[in-house]
Amino acid sequence: MKGNAEKQVYAALDKFKIELPSWGFADTGTRFGKFFQDASAVDLGDKLHDAGLVHKLTASCPTVAVHVLWDFKAGVSPKETAKLAKKHGIKIGAINPNVFQDQCYKFGSFCSPWKKAREQAMSHCLDSIKIGKEVGSTLLSMWLADGTNYPGQDSIANRWAMLKAAYRKLHDAMPRGMQLLVEYKPFEPAFYHTDIPDWGASYILAKHSGKNAKVLVDTGHHLQGCNIEQIVTLLLHEDMLGGFHFNDRKYADDDLTISSIDPYAVFRIFDQIEQFMFDTGKDPKLAYMVDQCHNLKPKLEAMVQTVMMAQDLYAKAAIVDRKKLAEAQKQADVTKAERVLRDAYETDVRPIVEQWRKKNGIPRNPLKELRDSGIIEQLGKERNAKRKALGISRGGSFA
Ligand code: PSV
Ligand code: MN
């Protein structure tokens, strides 16, 4: 690789930070059941420990996203949680309220025909904002499971009107410096209509909410064949892209580890972000986050693997020869233009990424280091003992 490209990779990796989800360290499953892991996190302390460990190994994950219902318990001060995170060398990142799990949300949250559900959702989200303030978070990340299963079940228009009013209220309740991220998803758990189905709906909601609201793109939340990088580009140029939930999928919202199915797709997203920065000279300050629920791979391994993949692909996007690409595009030389992208994508950046790691005092191969260290086995023993001592029998919710 040429010296210039090496510098570009270093600069890109110095800048690239990706947030880990606390729920990615806990036992998860599909609707057909859960398969437990000895080393999965028992409580928030374990999740913060694990997130801290991934950060130590990769130097790219200084923050951890939390899910309010799963992570915060009544009687425990959020400030204590922030302190605990600090102890593990990380900070609390995005606050994710949970307005989908309680029985009252059977027909939705802010869009429910049940007043009680709408009120509970609002009070929980306002509490979440308070928690966010206390832990010093700058992001309120909203995802709703709202939708209907049958045509005619409810008024799509009424639901939309209630939703707009609720998001604006949340936006206005946020302290200065906090951003509202509006996530969308085309289906699941609702199978006829979803109240925020796509980036268009998220865009409208964010615009209506106020200047501190932007769109969150979860890469698993699109219908097959959707051109996600185009959505990214349009949102960037409209100054409406807030961040990402990265994961990979083959069919629906499969929540697999990043780029396990289609690395080129992730590269194309990073490429468009790099292109935007090259064209405009602006840093869009995006919140890169992981949102994965790997059920088979050991939690810590899957997370480290994901971060390493993200680093490699981000590095590849940073070395696209943008001048050459512009020339090819001007000449309408389709083959050459595509080749320029592929040249970067096919470059083996691993040696230079390893050098970057060495320079940062972290292992050249974080995944190998993790596996060789025996920590997963050790945590498995400790956490099984903890479960026994606490009388925890496994089952129940995601948390
Ligand atoms: C919903 O599928 C989602 O992507 C939202 O971001 C939730 O917060 C997360 O998954 C829960 O796993
Ligand atoms: Mn998500």
Image (cartoon, grey):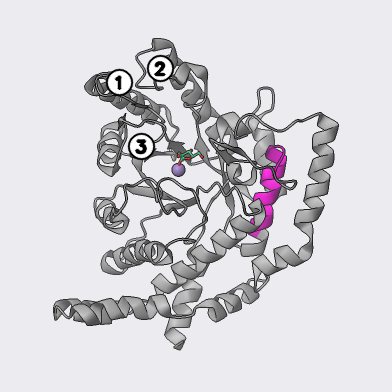
Give the mark nearest the N terminus, 1 or 2: 2
Q: Position of 145 compared to 282: left or right?
A: right
Tell me the magenta residue range: 40-55
Mark 3–mark 1 Cα distance, whole angstroms, equals 20 Å
**Residue at the spot of label 3:** 187
In the picture, the disc for residue 118 is 2
Q: Quadrant of residue 66?
A: top right
Query: SS class of the residue under badge 1?
Result: helix
Looking at the picture, which amino acid does disc 3 mark?
A: Phe
Q: How many marks?
A: 3
Looking at the picture, which amino acid does disc 2 mark?
A: Arg
**Residue at the spot of label 1:** 162
Pointer 1 local density, CA inside 10 Å: few below 14, some 14–19, many at least 20: some
Question: Is 203 contained in the magenta span?
Answer: no
Q: Is mark 3 within 8 Å of ligand 1?
A: no
Relative to 166, is 223 above or below? below
Q: Position of 299 compared to 6: left or right?
A: right
